[in-house]
Image (cartoon, rainbow, N blue to C red):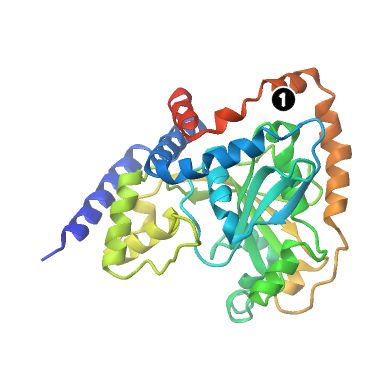
């Protein structure tokens, strides 16, 4: 006798399979529409929690003089996770439901106004990513038994708010991760988890990304066909979580926010329990793959052969590069100045973003 949760999970799996048969591969327009639907669902679902943080965020944004910013990456304290989650859910087009495993969260902060300019999250990398594995050249023993995979982190979130984005803020944020001074993610990773951090991976939503292009610290490896999750509605996500909880297969705890369990992990659990191949219920979605080396000898470190050799790059180096290469050039353009003048912080209110999701569909 199957439980109601099991029957509901099986129904959702069949619905997802029917969708995949009709849409085996997502194109950009289709993916954008799905992401806007999922974003609206999440904003409506968490509206009350988000509204509790809204005024704090709007007050921060009103303090920023976009012609005089001084960006820097700082680690997010758990007491500020509510602001981090708010900006992640409001500023990004991709739905956010938390992440499992190792995790570091950062703000990009304007040191002049002390207001947040964006959010970054990195954590445990994917078990399987062929382009990365081919670039490293490791074998299963080096990857798993010698702990190589614990020395790689995936940048799952790198989201500048607007108009920092039109000032190439995303380039600053991704580039500023590639440092090895005492304030770096590499130092924090070692202090928190005990492993050196030799490599970052970044997967972009729509293949090769303009945000990551032309950065000397990032190397583009190509495009991989990932398995999409945007076809999973918020109601179905909640129902599948209920089923996973019933069978004791979630194993995830809250990171002091109201979000738990990534959609990817949840679908893997459901497919494993119901003996359904993951490819049966997920559309293929092209994603660009980038890597960034945090030491001079990443391959040798990842294969357990050598200790990291420093690259001797500081966040101050990243700030100087950003100002000289991107920020000053963008500020000099009249059309960019016009967009800065037109920015309304109130557009980052929850209800305004819910309305915007409908307009963009």
Residue at far left of view = 1
Is residue 5 left or right of 181 when viewed as pictured?
Answer: left
Placement of 41 over or under 187, stated as above or below: above
Mark 1 neighbour density, 10 Å: few (under 14) some (14–19) many (20 or more): some
The quadrant in which residue 71 appears is top right
Placement of 210 over or under 193, stated as above or below: above
The residue closer to the viewer here, 18 or 123, is 123
Residue at figure coordinates x 77%, y 56% from the top left: 178
Residue 207 seen by the camera: yes
Measuring from the top left, give residue 107's x and y in whole percent: 67, 50
Count of residue discs: 1
Is residue 134 left or right of 19 when viewed as pictured?
Answer: right
The quadrant in which residue 244 appears is bottom left
Measuring from the top left, give residue 140's x and y in whole percent: 58, 75
The residue closer to the viewer here, 265 or 132, is 265
Residue ID for mark 1: 340
Residue at figure coordinates x 81%, y 66% from the top left: 182
Residue at figure coordinates x 57%, y 67% from the top left: 102
Residue at figure coordinates x 65%, y 33% from the top left: 162
Measuring from the top left, give residue 207's x and y in whole percent: 60, 41
């Amino acid at each position: 006798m199957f439980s109601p949760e099991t029957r509901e999970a099986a129904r959702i799996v069949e619905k997802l399979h029917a969708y995949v048969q009709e849409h085996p591969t997502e194109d950009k327009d289709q993916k954008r529409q799905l992401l806007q639907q999922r974003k609206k669902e999440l904003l409506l679902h968490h509206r009350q929690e988000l509204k509790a943080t809204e005024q704090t965020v709007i007050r921060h944004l009103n303090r920023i003089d976009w012609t005089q910013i001084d960006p820097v990456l700082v680690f997010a304290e758990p007491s500020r996770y509510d602001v981090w989650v708010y900006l992640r859910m409001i500023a990004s087009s991709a739905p956010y439901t938390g992440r499992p495993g190792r995790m570091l969260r950062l703000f990009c902060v304007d040191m002049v106004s002390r207001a947040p300019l964006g959010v970054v999250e990195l954590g445990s990398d994917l078990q399987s990513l062929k382009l990365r594995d081919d670039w490293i050249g490791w074998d299963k023993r080096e990857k798993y038994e010698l702990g190589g995979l614990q020395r790689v982190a995936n940048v799952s979130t790198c989201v500048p708010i607007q108009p920092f984005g039109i000032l190439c803020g995303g380039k600053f944020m991704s580039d500023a991760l590639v440092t090895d001074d005492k304030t770096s993610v590499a130092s924090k990773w070692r202090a928190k988890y005990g492993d050196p951090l030799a490599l970052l991976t970044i997967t972009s939503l729509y293949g090769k990304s303009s945000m990551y292009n032309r950065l000397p610290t990032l190397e583009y490896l190509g495009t991989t066909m990932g398995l999409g999750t945007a076809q999973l509605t918020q109601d179905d996500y909640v129902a599948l979580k209920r089923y996973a909880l019933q069978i004791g297969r979630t194993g995830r705890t809250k990171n002091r926010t109201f979000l738990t369990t990534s959609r990817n992990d949840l679908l893997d659990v459901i497919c494993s329990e119901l003996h359904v191949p993951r490819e049966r219920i997920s559309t293929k979605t092209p994603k660009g793959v980038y890597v960034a080396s945090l030491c001079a000898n990443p391959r040798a470190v990842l294969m357990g052969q050598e200790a990291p050799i420093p690259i001797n790059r500081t966040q101050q180096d990243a700030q100087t590069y950003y100002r000289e290469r991107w920020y000053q050039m963008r500020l000099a353009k009249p059309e960019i100045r016009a967009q800065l003048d037109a920015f309304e912080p109130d557009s980052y209110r929850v209800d305004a973003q819910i309305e915007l999701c409908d307009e963009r569909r």
